[in-house]
Amino acid sequence: MQTWPSRFVMLLQLAALHMETASAAPVPRHPPPMLQKAPPPGNPVRGADIYEAKCGACHSLDANRIGPKHRGIFGRKSGAVPGFRYSAALKKLDVVWDAQTLDRWLRNPTAMAPGTAMGYRLAVAQERADVIAYLKQQSSQR
Amino acid sequence: MIDVNDFQSRRRILSGSATVLSAAGMLALLNTSARAAGTKAKSANIAQDVRLLNAALSLEDEGIAAYQIGAESKLLTPDVLKVAVIFQGHHKQHRDDLTAAIKRLGGAPVKAKPLPEYAKALNAASLKDQTGVLRLALKLERGATNAYLGLIPSLDQSDLYVLAARTAADESFHAAVLGHVLGDAILEKAPMFG
């Protein structure tokens, strides 16, 4: 049977271990995906304008620039655009891009892939849905 | 003569002290461990900031290149060229500010690519007149304003918020001037960026 001092020591050790693991990674500021609401329906026409205004500084559909090209992103594995130099975080991120994963990504990329070079957050859910609808539409063209 | 009872009671006291010391030692260890974890997290956050700033630096390098392509295109009138060179100078200042911030955080600034690579990525071959050059500049400036504003919540070091916000303000000024020269209607709804 354990005495109280040894139990106390065990508790301290557990607390220390918890603090170490909990503090090592940035704390996500959003609820986990299963607790989030489904994204609203997107409008690709609005999405085209938002894409140019808010994504266009770094991304194009058909050219790798600061970020990778986007045409064909739907159904593509993360970190898989040929010729683009990804961060280690994106190489490690193992997702297939679809409406849900893109919504998570655009909401907070550094929470989804700590260490990514993309810090831009598209905060408005409707704007994310519109951009995602546009990317989906463009992915099926050409 | 040794009092056995007294000896046993002293032993209990010493053993109790040892337990207390052990708990105190564990608390010290806990503190050290928490400090180490804190240092690790801080270091991860700094490394994250360096990556984000390097992405911003790449964006500035592309902006400098875009104005260079425009300036060398012979498509700009002398007055417009003069303004383009001033705007390019602002972007060079942004580049230098970002480079200094990255170095201050202990990071290595990314290097700019050769001009032809930017020209290809920006599809510069499709630029046929001054309006085309200015449209490209406006797209990049507007995008850069949004990029800096959208970046702020992801930055860990609070002094970088000012750097990002200040740079966003410069980019929005550029976008406003370019929009005016192009005769674009003023957006009716605010916020116009972010």
Image: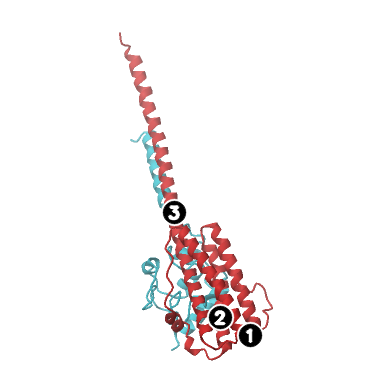
Identify the residue at the far left of this view.
B1
SS of the residue at dot 1? loop
Give the answer, above or below, for where A32 lies relative to B112. Answer: above
Q: Quadrant of residue B174?
A: bottom right
Q: Earlier in the sequence, mark 2 or mark 3?
A: 3
How dense is the environment of label 2, judged by Cα within 10 Å: few (below 14), some, or many (20 and up)?
many
Identify the residue at the far top of this view.
B1
Residue position for label 2:
B137
Q: Earlier in the sequence, mark 1 or mark 2?
A: 2
Left or right: A91 as drawn, with respect to A27: left
How dense is the environment of label 3, judged by Cα within 10 Å: few (below 14), some, or many (20 and up)?
many
Residue position for label 3:
B41
> Disc 3 sits on a residue from what chain?
B
For residue B182, which numbered disc appears in the image? 1
Numbered label tally: 3
Most foreground residue, A57 or B60: B60
Amino acid type for the residue under numbered disc 2: Ala
Residue A42 visible to the viewer: no
Amino acid type for the residue under numbered disc 3: Ala
Residue B129 visible to the viewer: yes
**Residues at marks 3 and 1, CA–CA distance in whole angstroms:** 47 Å
Query: In x, y percent, where is residue B98?
Result: 50, 65
Q: Are marks 2 and 3 on the same chain?
A: yes
Q: Which chain is red?
A: B
Amino acid type for the residue under numbered disc 1: Leu
Query: In x, y percent, where is residue B102?
Result: 47, 62
For the C terminus of chain B, the quadrant is bottom right
